[in-house]
Image (cartoon, rainbow, N blue to C red):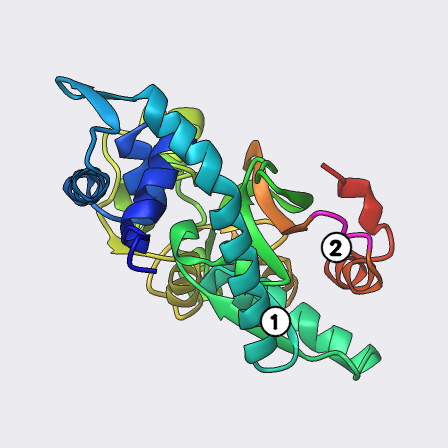
Amino acid sequence: MHDLPPLKALRVFDACIRLGSFTRAAKELNVGQPAISHQIQALEQDIGMALFERRGAQTTPTAEALAFHRTIASALADMARATVEMRRHARRPGLALATYPGIAMYWLMPKLAALRQSEPQFSFRVTTAERDIDMRIEDADFAILFGEGNWPGFESRLLVKQEVVPVAAPALAARVGHLSRASLLEQGPLIHLEDKTHRWFTWQDWRDRRAPDAEMIDAGIHVTNHGIAIHQTLIGVGIALGWHGVIDDLLANGLLVALDSEPLRSERGYYLVAPRRVMESDIGVTLLRALLGPDSRRSDS
């Protein structure tokens, strides 16, 4: 075993080769690029040869590095699969689902509760994280993720398309419901969902498409996940962009009021994600039916 290089350095090397750049490897491993360079240098020192040609900020793997990766890639994949299987055996019983806090709180948990009433033999364990990179979807049976439906190595089914409208609690809606779109943006109070990856619609998107004449956007308050945004909206703190499909029950029960009849739409949305062929298993079909209703096959991707 003393002939093996450090596993951390091998993981970094594998990510650099697979993804084609130190920058993308740093993003996948959730570390800074200097840490990637440090691990590659450590591996090169351990092996005794350069693995990448460096031309300024650009790095290119050598022929020896590519041959080395071809040799070790299957071993790393086998280690990953064996580790996932061990984790599955070690975890508590129940179907494991991973998703974001907001979608879990206001959409997933009520549907799972209804499923438990009709199918009491099912048990679930739901884990949440605000960022995709913090969700170990390979350790979960299913995940609910935001995107365009493409997760390599997994299959997906669309659950909720991105379709948002401004919403407020009834008392606040009564005070601001008469305002124009521009005035609503300028006066607020708005609740902003921070999104450094620029995937979700923001108030800037609403202004660009619905109120380009607005002179400013109320600074309001900023939160880091959709669940907090909806909670603050429910208690009357401000106006948020709410997702149709996620907040439908809140609208139907009068807990929230839509302030516009023309939502913003995109082709992105929340998807149920699972390893290949799991979606067609008995539990996959049952879960899809619980999340989408009887016509669960309509959203194949």
Observer able to see residue 23: yes
The image position of residue 121, as x and y in percent, is 79, 83
Residue at left 44%, top 26%? 209
Viewer-proximal residue, 152 or 186? 152
Observer able to see residue 189: no
- Residue that numbered label 1 is attached to: 109
How packed mark 2 is, by other alpha carbons closer than 10 Å (few <14, some 14-19, many 20 or more), is some
Question: What is the magenta range?
Answer: 276-280
Residue at left 82%, top 58%? 281
User: Residue type at mark 2?
Assistant: Val
How packed mark 1 is, by other alpha carbons closer than 10 Å (few <14, some 14-19, many 20 or more), is some
Taking the magenta stretch, the answer to whether it contains residue 278 is: yes
Kindly report which numbered mark, 2 or 1, lies closer to the viewer in this rendering.
2
Where disc 2 sits, the SS reads loop
Predominant secondary structure, magenta span? loop
Where disc 1 sits, the SS reads helix
Q: Quarter holding the C terminus?
A: top right
Q: Earlier in the sequence, mark 2 or mark 1?
A: 1
- Residue that numbered label 2 is attached to: 278
Rendered position, 53 above or below 50: above
Viewer-proximal residue, 223 or 177? 223
Taking the magenta stretch, the answer to whether it contains residue 16 is: no
Q: Quarter holding the N terminus?
A: bottom left
User: Residue type at mark 1?
Assistant: Met
Left or right: residue 43 compared with residue 107 = left
